[in-house]
């Protein structure tokens, strides 16, 4: 029998070349639905931005296998691929396509959208597709909730049995029963939702503390890394830039929480940490993962200022809020959207303790699927495997500049009040210089700290260098330090690429143009929504 629920749900999962993560995400959804007896109206839209045909086929196979599962759930699963995205774009008028380019990109003459446009454009395309779908069916936009999640997340809060814990759908219905609430952001547990480019100092702090502690005991000494629970309680304690967001910086190293169960010594902990450390470049923070706080639901919704784009819910009637500045492909799109929502919606934009499990890697080998801005390959260095973060570092830096620029502008009335060109330019340059100073300070510190750790690691008298069985762990730590130096040290590949951008007006001009164009982007977006809704209404009446 169908469940008499207050809302229908649409879960949107953008994905780009991540079949294993998508499979985990979909499977976790089924487990959660079963654990909580969900039998209401639910649609899942997988918005595919993949470049690899093998990945696309794998995604389609995953969804084909999922259809028909869950006999007690009215579940519809749709693959929204590049061809469907292109058809949506080509379905707009020539003028609409022109004015919507910054939000949804373009499609080729063959009617197919290009791959790897980025999650922001892909989410915007999915939003327009949902507008069409709801208009065609006559669904009540006030009683339909759109839940955007990421493919590297799972529907569990990490507490208790998998799939248990929070009954997400019931909690969302309870919160959105208040008609004043338009947008809700949840959070994540597990791996931090930020780039390695802004976690390198905290990671090095903790590694330095770990090496010092190891050096203070013998390799046979009972493992000293079981004295602390797994870290992750403080707000943004993994983030080097926490103070710029108004959080207190955690200055003391966070101790490693050894995962080895059996009785063992420091040498086993040394080996265990070495097996995790290079997962950092894929987004792990082995010492500062995020744990959930609070109880199991029944939680308060409080005013918010940032959106976790991998876990936020919008009432369908509020799909007028698209991901802004999507064409720039910068990180921090969620926090930027959050500042705009706070300015426009006030108390209608809320946050609640409804976290999803975030896993950046696939297995104990710390392998990861595609991530935009991260290049993997080989080079002629002693540690021959490498990860190049220069693209992600660029997107993070300019994303921070965009965020703090928008934050200052919203404090002065943006987007309701449009800043003049001089104020805009001055704000962007001042913000750029302030963020650059913070990056310079942290990168210099990271390089010095990496060098110090390397010296300690190479000490010929250190017990890890006297035991041949620990040569691989020593090599892994060395590989991590090499990666830090290659990506963040002055003169490094990643650092040089960032410095190059500082000598050009290209990005400040692009940011200024994007912000100046936001009102017209909003008008174009709302115009398309109105036209599609009106056309569908007429069609239903014929």
Image (cartoon, helix red, strand yellow):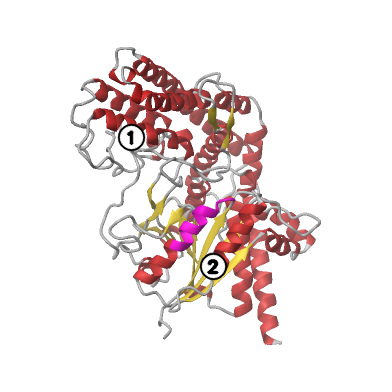
Position of residue 521 measured from the top left corner of the image (x, y, whole percent)? 65, 55
Quarter of the image with the N terminus in it = bottom left
Q: Classify residue 62 as left or right of residue 96.
A: left
**Location of mark 2 (residue):** 65
Quarter of the image with the C terminus in it = bottom right
Farthest residue toward the front? 468
Q: CA distance from mark 1 to mark 2?
A: 37 Å
Residue at the spot x=57%, y=35% of the render? 376
Position of residue 500 measured from the top left corner of the image (x, y, whole percent)? 63, 25
**Location of mark 1 (residue):** 272
Dot 1: within a 10 Å radius of its alpha carbon, few (fewer than 14), some, or many (20 or more) residues? some
* 214 shown above or below 9: above
Farthest residue toward the right? 109
* 520 shown above or below 430: below
Residue at the spot x=51%, y=42% of the render? 403
Q: How many marks?
A: 2
Residue at the spot x=66%, y=36% of the render? 509
Q: Classify residue 157 as left or right of residue 99.
A: left
- Prevailing secondary structure class for the magenta stretch in the rendered image: helix
Closer to the camera in the image, 522 or 451: 451
Where, by quadrant of the figure, is residue 28 drawn?
bottom left
User: Is residue 213 visible in the rendered structure shown here?
Assistant: yes
Magenta range: 17-27
User: Is residue 519 visible in the rendered structure shown here?
Assistant: no
- In the rendered structure, does residue 201 fall within the stretch colored magenta? no
Dot 2: within a 10 Å radius of its alpha carbon, few (fewer than 14), some, or many (20 or more) residues? few
Position of residue 273 measured from the top left corner of the image (x, y, whole percent)? 34, 33
Helix, strand or loop for disc 2? helix
Closer to the camera in the image, 541 or 368: 368
Closer to the camera in the image, 167 or 433: 167
Contact between labelled residues 2 and 1, with CB atoms less than 8 Å apart: no
Closer to the camera in the image, 333 or 288: 288
């Amino acid at each position: 029998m169908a469940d008499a629920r207050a809302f229908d749900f649409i879960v949107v999962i953008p994905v780009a070349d991540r079949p294993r993560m998508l499979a985990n995400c979909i499977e976790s959804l089924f487990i959660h639905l079963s654990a909580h007896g969900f039998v209401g109206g639910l649609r899942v839209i997988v918005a595919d931005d993949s470049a690899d045909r093998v990945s696309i086929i794998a995604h389609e196979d995953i969804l084909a296998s999922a259809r028909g599962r869950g006999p007690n759930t009215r579940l519809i699963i749709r693959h929204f691929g590049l061809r469907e995205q292109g058809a949506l774009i080509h379905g707009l008028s020539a003028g609409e396509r022109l004015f919507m380019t910054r939000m949804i990109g373009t499609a080729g003459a063959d009617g197919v959208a290009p791959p790897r446009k980025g999650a922001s454009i892909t989410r915007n395309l999915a939003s327009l597709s949902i507008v069409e779908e709801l208009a065609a069916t006559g669904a009540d936009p006030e009683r339909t909730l759109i839940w955007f999640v990421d493919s590297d997340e799972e529907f569990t809060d990490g507490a208790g049995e998998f799939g248990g814990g929070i009954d997400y759908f019931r909690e969302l219905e309870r919160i959105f029963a208040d008609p004043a609430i338009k947008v809700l952001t949840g959070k994540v547990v597990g791996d931090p939702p930020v780039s390695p480019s802004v976690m390198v100092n905290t990671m090095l702090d903790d590694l330095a503390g770990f090496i010092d502690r190891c050096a203070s005991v013998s390799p046979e000494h009972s493992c000293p890394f079981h004295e602390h629970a797994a870290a992750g309680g403080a707000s943004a304690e993994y983030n080097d830039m926490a103070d710029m967001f108004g959080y207190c910086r955690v200055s003391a190293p966070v101790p490693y929480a050894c995962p080895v169960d059996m009785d063992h010594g420091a040498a086993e902990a040394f080996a265990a940490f070495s097996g995790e450390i290079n997962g950092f470049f894929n987004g792990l923070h082995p010492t500062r993962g995020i744990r959930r706080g609070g109880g199991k639901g029944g939680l308060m919704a409080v005013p918010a200022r940032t959106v976790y784009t991998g876990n936020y819910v919008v009432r369908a009637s509020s799909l007028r809020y698209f991901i802004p500045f999507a064409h720039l492909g910068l990180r921090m799109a969620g926090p930027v959207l959050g500042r705009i929502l706070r300015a426009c919606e006030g108390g209608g934009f809320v946050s609640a303790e409804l976290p999803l499990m975030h896993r950046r890697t696939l297995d104990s080998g710390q392998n990861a699927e595609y991530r935009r801005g991260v290049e993997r390959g080989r080079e002629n260095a002693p540690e021959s495997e490498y990860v190049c973060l220069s693209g992600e570092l660029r997107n993070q830096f300019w994303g921070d500049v965009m965020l703090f620029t928008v934050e200052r502008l919203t404090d002065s009335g943006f987007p309701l009040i449009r800043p003049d060109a001089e104020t805009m330019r001055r704000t962007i340059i001042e913000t750029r210089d302030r963020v650059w100073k913070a990056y310079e300070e942290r990168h210099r510190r990271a390089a010095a700290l990496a060098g110090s750790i390397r010296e300690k690691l190479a000490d010929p008298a250190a017990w890890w260098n006297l035991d041949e069985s620990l040569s691989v762990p020593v090599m892994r730590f060395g590989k991590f330090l090499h990666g830090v130096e290659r990506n963040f040290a002055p003169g490094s590949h990643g650092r040089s690429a960032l410095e190059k951008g500082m000598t050009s007006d290209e990005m400040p001009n692009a940011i200024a143009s994007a912000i100046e164009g936001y009102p017209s982007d909003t008008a174009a977006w709302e115009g398309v929504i109105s036209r599609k809704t009106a056309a569908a209404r007429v069609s239903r009446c014929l």
